[in-house]
Image (spheres, rainbow, N blue to C red):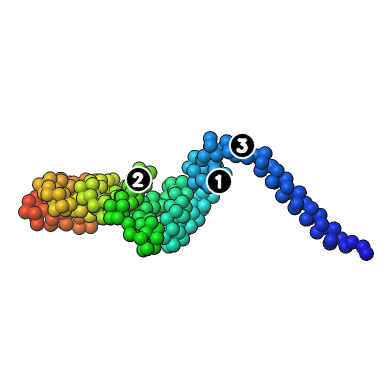
């Protein structure tokens, strides 16, 4: 009985596959010493550490003009993990997006916020095994503090890379200090930075003055700073994009120390 052409091709495919498997198994033993040396001396090139490889620039040249597109995909993937409350996946893809496209300010702004506010809750939930265990309050504070510091680090780096939007970064830093770390003095300092930036957040000036006066008991210092800040608007050194000067004067009047507005002569 003759052998069909199809049977011959199948036999050849099976034999070729077997040869490749055997060869791969044999070469794995030959290459194992080199792999172990690489793992010990070049940890950045381990397969499970793609983020480390990207951080050192080993693959950025390969991506070329597709880096921004890949960063967007990585960021979308981080949001999938965010929706599932998966800290490791969210953080990995978020940092990959930052590495691929550090010029995207939104990555830094949202990344810092998510790290400080969302990730500690996921970490606590994981350690508590979905509610079956109960962590000590001290441990919970430590976890929140650690992620808050990571978030502040991301936002501070973002402010350095995006000076035109620094006020947004400092404002978010202030909110982390105020709501997570419970450090009003540090929060006040970040609000001051946001108010004194090149493109300031006007409400940061009121937040700074209120924290200084009401939370820290330094009303006289707050009054002097607020008067000096309002004076910049009176002199035209700061552009009044709305009712900023009016609001500042209103606060100073409430404190009983408002400086009379200057008469602008034609």
Say which element carries label 3.
Answer: helix
Q: Nearer the viewer, residue 199 or 91?
A: 91
Residue ranking furthest to the right:
1
Q: Quadrant of residue 58?
A: top right
Closest to the observer: 197 or 31?
31
Task: Give the image location of residue 67, x and y in percent.
Answer: 51, 49
Q: In the drawing, does residue 54 fall left or right of residue 110?
A: right
Of labels 1 and 3, earlier in sequence is: 3
Where does label 3 land, which residue? 34
> Which disc, if any, is residue 47?
1
Q: Is 192 situated above or below 41?
A: below
Question: Which of marks 2 and 1 precedes in the sequence?
Answer: 1
Q: Name the residue under label 2.
A: 153
212 vs 3, left or right, is: left
Is residue 150 positioned above or below 85 on the image? above
Residue 21 position in % (x across, y down): 72, 50
**Structural crowding at the residue carrying mark 2, measured as other residues with C-alpha within 10 Å and reported as few (<14), some (14–19) or many (≥20):** some
The answer to whether one can see residue 252 in this image is yes
Give the Cα distance between marks 3 and 2: 37 Å
Determine whether, in the image, residue 233 is placed left or right of residue 122. left
Q: Can residue 110 be seen in this view?
A: no
């Amino acid at each position: 009985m003759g052998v069909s052409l199809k049977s011959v091709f199948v036999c050849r495919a099976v034999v070729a596959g077997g040869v490749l498997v055997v060869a791969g198994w044999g070469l794995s033993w030959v290459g194992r010493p080199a792999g172990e040396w690489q793992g010990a001396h070049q940890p950045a090139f381990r397969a499970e550490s793609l983020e480390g490889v990207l951080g050192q620039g080993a693959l950025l040249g390969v991506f070329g003009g597709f880096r921004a597109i890949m960063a967007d995909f990585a960021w979308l993937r981080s949001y999938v993990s965010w929706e599932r409350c998966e800290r490791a996946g969210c953080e990995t893809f978020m940092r990959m997006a930052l590495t691929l496209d550090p010029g995207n300010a939104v990555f830094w702004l949202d990344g810092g916020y998510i790290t400080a506010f969302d990730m500690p809750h996921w970490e606590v939930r994981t350690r508590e095994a979905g509610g079956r265990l109960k962590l000590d309050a001290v441990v919970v504070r430590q976890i929140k503090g650690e992620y808050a510091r990571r978030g502040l680090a991301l936002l501070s780096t973002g402010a350095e890379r995006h000076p035109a939007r620094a006020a947004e970064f400092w404002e978010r830093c202030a909110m982390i200090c105020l709501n997570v770390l419970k450090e009003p003095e540090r929060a006040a300092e970040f609000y001051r930075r946001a108010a004194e930036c090149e493109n300031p957040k006007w409400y940061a000036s009121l937040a700074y003055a209120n924290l200084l006066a009401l939370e820290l008991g330094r009303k006289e210092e707050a009054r002097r700073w607020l008067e000096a800040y309002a004076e910049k608007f009176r002199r035209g050194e700061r552009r009044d994009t709305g009712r900023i000067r009016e609001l500042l004067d209103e606060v100073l009047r409430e404190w009983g120390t408002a400086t009379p507005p200057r008469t602008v002569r034609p």
